[in-house]
Image (tube, rainbow, N blue to C red):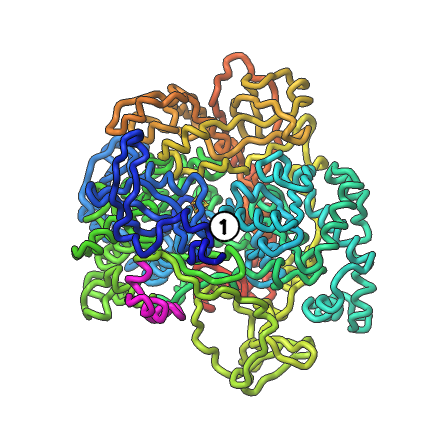
Amino acid sequence: MSQTFYPGPSRIHLAAFPPKERWDEWRELDSTAWPRRVERRYMLVPTTCFNCESACGLLAYVDLDTKEIRKLEGNPEHPGSRGKNCAKGPATLNQSQDPDRILYPLKRAGKRGEGRWERVSWDQALDDIASRIRKAIQEGRRNEVVYHVGRPGEDGYAERVMAAWGLDGHNSHTNICSSGARAGYHYWMGFDRPSPDHANADVILLVSAHLESGHYFNPHAQRIMEAKREGAKLIVFDVRLSNTATHADHWLAPYPGSEAAIFLAIARHLIEKKLYDREFVRQWWNWREYLETEKPDLPPTFESFEEVLAGLYREFTFAYASKESGVETSVLEEVADIVAKAGTRLSTHNWRSAAAGNLGGWQVSRALFLLNALLGAVAKPGSVYPNGWNKFVARPIHLPPHPDVWNEMSWPADYPLSLHEMSFLLPHLVKEGRGRLDVYFTRVYNPVWTNPDGFTWIEMLNDEEKVGLHVALTPTWSETAYFADYILPMGIGSERHDIHSYETHDAQWIGFRQPVMRAVRERLGEKVTDSRGSNPGEVWEENELWIELSWRIDPDGGMGIRKFFESRERPEEKLGVDEYYRYIFENSVPGLPQKAAAEGLAPLAYMRRYGAFEVSKSVGALHEQEVPAEELEDVRVDPRGRAFTRAPKPPPINIVPQPTPDGDAEGRRPVGVEIDSRIVRGFPTPSGKLEFYSSTLATWGWPEYALPGYIKSQIHPENLEEGEIPLIPTFRLPVQIHTRSANAKWLDEIAHTNPLWIHPRDAVRIGVRTGELVRVETRAGHFVVKAWVTEGIRPGVVACSHHMGRWKLADSGQRQLMATVAIRHDHSSWALARKAGVVPYDSKDGDTRRIWWTDSGVHQNLTFPVQPDPISGMHCWHQAVRIRRALPGDAYGDVVVDTEKMHRYYRKWLEMTRPAARVSPDGTRRPYWLLRPLKPSHAAYRLPRE
Ligand code: SF4
């Protein structure tokens, strides 16, 4: 039986994939030549998809006669995606062949934003950029150099570049994406993401449209469907009847923001009926710390904790949850019973969705994980693992030290607990005069279009006093690139090197992205040293770009930067990508050299041939691993069971970023936790246990939220004004992905609009039918969109996907999914109006004459004020809006905004914060143990003296 399956990780029937022994020359018939029988010869080369965070494996079919990539399919050797892809994977081909893509470095020729460009050489661009960075560093203006990333698509390379330059200059998009969910998980288990073992679960509870567009959705979707085939029950929370909801056994569409109230009601049910795993709770929750801190009058016994626990969630009856959510009590009871019966085989997942939409959204994931923690469904088959255990990050050739600066523009002290950089507040911080940017990189990032409040971004980017030089590193045109000084063409998934590893299941794997045509030329015996030689035009990969730029910043090595980009094999010479990855694969990935040798290959050659390696098939319950005796030197166990040691920490094999709980007062480091007289690894939290009680929240100014709880959203009915209803703007379209997919013609043909989902009752109330125009008024502007009347959304709530509404100001740009618009501007009043939709056009690709759609959707995010959660820092996306039939003079796609109103709104939300200067218990800016992508030195954590 086993012989009928592909022997690699995919386990799919042999006929589905070309056997790997024949990847050098694979022959098959050309489907486009049908009915003629035309045979094509291909070399099959693996790489990794760059179109979402899942990093699925791809297999490029390179025509050996024309030396062109003809298609991309799944890589059966990839342990995460196992040969499968969503539509966006194969559409990488469109992105590569897009007739409108940017192929050469461009420099602006007129005023910023005017849309005039001239082609320049890479040398000209890099010399200019490098000299500015060098000057900023030498003049002590290190915080004026910032790298702002959208989709990283790799593990740690860019952070190391910033560290090598001595900057705290890493800025990410995470606070408009996932900080809400991360915070909820982080406070529980130290790591900030779940790694659900969906395939082995009995019950899967998803708070999102996870099957079609969630985090790691293709790898997860296939495992969820496997579990369903084995009889697992699927529960989906989604205000829309998403594709995922259609697959659910139980679809709940609660009032947005009420999800945590439901989870707490289920928790109450588990506690009241004593359906929880007492032994797990006794061993692994930090209940003793909670009692000693908050209930010092009670005996510190598990029995007294259970008595307290029984009362903690008393108010969260099913009736209360029903009142908050609008879901019938009987449905909630039924779902609670199903969850209870799952026992330890409960996999749950919340990533964006409710956690990203609501004030206090982080309590949604915290309350959701409470169900796992009650049932002991943590790090067991079919449950949820901490992500850091299911991810492998390999040690690179050079590891620069932590920078000794703190960038207040990314990590303002107003938000000491924010999980990531307060990136979307940047223009408001600049507007307040908190600082300026001298060199600002936007890299695969389009804040003008993706972030809320895009006109405030345009105001900042257009002001050369505030932003000295804006460099857009992008594989395609974007709204933000229009306001750049340089546009530098980056490679897509088949044109660049990267490594990555994600928590798709209980295992560890490492994937290798590579420039496909470079790999082909090497396999054919050519020597290639620069990816520009094999990519289209002068498209470059970032690995090589950063090495080159670093050498130009520090040409003689005097600034201490160059040494991190030097070869070890050839001292005094530049590091090359071959050496960089050769070092990693030979020295830092356990098992890879042996596996490669078994096939007669060097490790780098193995990764170039197969594109992925499974480091570990199963990781299991690391928290239960006993700490070896040699790590217990002069061990001290504190009264709560935290064990500290003087033994030095062994150098980690896996350098995945770790939370760093404090040591004891005598200089020992935390090494584990004592459970029933055994010292085991525990969790990377301050207590070493799962933190039901967060001392971090309690001591950093938020004691009222130290336990999993329920925070009423900014769109809770109590917080809405007369006539307002919630707008859900967070959902993705399954075949589009933010900015990058606009230049994929197959995807554009499938999805090119974003109508407003509106329930028939609401449609009747405002008098619109499907296709008619609706004006949606936020608190700082409005947009005009088409209605889609559907019972697939909860009454009293409207929804609009953010994956549409792309625009360009001039003819230059992507023409398959960007409308041409005019922008009017008078002080703080901004208006965007469509001049022309998408039309057929002549190009080297005959399909551009076959474009039949004109629509490209409406850009709603422009009208959203920033709404930063005062704890997690997450932008709370859901909007309080009024909807009405469009007024005379309104036109489809109109957007009108007042940026002064936007700034006032920012100030209003800022008032909710509890700044570090007020709440820090130890004079630092932020708890040191919390994760931070680029962690400065201890000294930089100290708040400046008044
Ligand atoms: S876009 Fe699709 S194929 Fe590509 S990584 Fe994401 S899920 Fe995988």
The residue drawn where x is 56% and y is 26% is: 756
Q: Where on the image, by quarter, is ligand 1?
A: top left
Residue 855 screen position, x and y as percent: 43, 23
Query: Is disc 1 placed on a helix, strand or loop?
Result: helix
The question of residue 749 being in magenta is answered with no
Answer above or below: position of 710 versus 303.
above
Name, please, the residue furthest toward the top.
888
| In this rendering, position of residue 788 left or right of residue 328 | left
Q: In the image, residue 655 lies at what x, y percent? A: 44, 67
704 w.r.t. 775: above or below: below
Determine which residue is flagged by label 1: 219
In this view, 908 is above or below 891: below
Say if residue 409 shows up in the picture: no
Please state which amino acid type lies under the numbered disc 1: Pro
Q: Residue at x 40, y 61 (%)?
A: 613
Q: Position of residue 795 (x, y in %)?
A: 68, 28
Which span is picked out in magenta?
586-608
Q: Residue furthest left?
A: 526
Q: Main secondary structure of the magenta part?
A: helix
Q: How many marks?
A: 1
589 drawn magenta: yes
Residue 400, x across and y down, in percent: 35, 67
